[in-house]
Amino acid sequence: MTYRDIALEYFPGATDDFLEYVIWNETGYPCFWCIPEDGANPVECFRKQLVEARGRRDEWPKRKMVKIMSEFKRCSNCGRYDFVDKHICPPEWQVYIPDWHDPDEPPERGFGHDQESVAEGYVEEHFSDLDYPEEVEIWVRKDSSCAWDKFSVTIEQVPSFSATKIKG
Ligand SMILES: [Zn+2]
């Protein structure tokens, strides 16, 4: 369990940006969070500070929270995360993945400024890590008057690092 998971118990459904804000700005984390007044161990202290933070939620800086809560969203058209007031969808393309799509159905929609970014963006958004492919063939064209261009998208796992404090 991470501190982010604990914070989520007090703010169910919160976005990662929201939790990041609460942890860094509304609790004592990372310098003044483990203090005897708040509990016997770091987790107890953190939980008490989260309850207090939730209790004074009306006092949190308004402008900053509004930006985190409402302006940064996933576009319902192109699926990109962006600040909604500045967002313009990238150009639309047609995409087809032989392994995933039915050839009798109309092509799927992809978005991007060139074919490579359309191919990468579409695969990134739609691949399932339960069925982890290493390479996906994807076809891209601007519209039905153009021929398909075929791409192979390679998916690499990114190493992840996490430190655990050693006792004693
Ligand atoms: Zn969009």
Image (cartoon, rainbow, N blue to C red):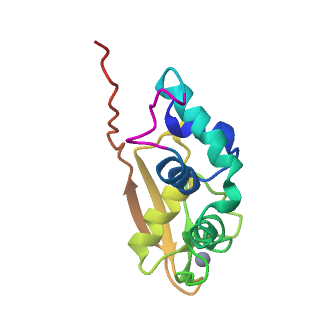
Residue 35, percent from left and from top? 45, 31
**From this viewpoint, which residue is outermost toward the front?**
37
- Count numbered badges in the picture: 0
Could you say which quadrant of the image residue 109 lies in? bottom right
Which residue is more in the foreground, 158 or 168? 168
Foreground pick, 60 / 119: 60
Q: In which quarter of the image is ligand 1?
A: bottom right
Residue at figure coordinates x 54%, y 25% from the top left: 39
Q: How far from the left and from the top, in percent, is residue 97?
A: 54, 59
Within the magenta stretch, is there residue 148?
no
What residue span does the magenta drawing correspond to?
Answer: 28-38
* Magenta stretch holds residue 34: yes
* Residue extending furthest toward the bottom: 145
Q: Quadrant of the C terminus?
A: top left
- Find residue 107 and report its horizontal and vertical position in percent: 64, 70
The secondary structure that dominates the magenta segment is: loop
Q: Which of the 4 quarters of the picture holds residue 110?
A: bottom right
Tell me where residue 6 sits by quadrant: top right
In the picture shown, does residue 79 fall above or below 168? below
Q: Nearer the viewer, residue 16 or 156?
A: 16
Residue drawn at (39%, 49%), measured in percent from left and top? 155
Q: Is residue 166 above or below residue 66?
A: above
Along the horizontal axis of the image, is 79 left or right of 159? right
Q: In this view, does 101 lie to the left or right of 91?
A: right
In the figure, 84 relative to 68: above or below? below
Residue 67, given in percent of the width and then of the height, sits at 59, 71
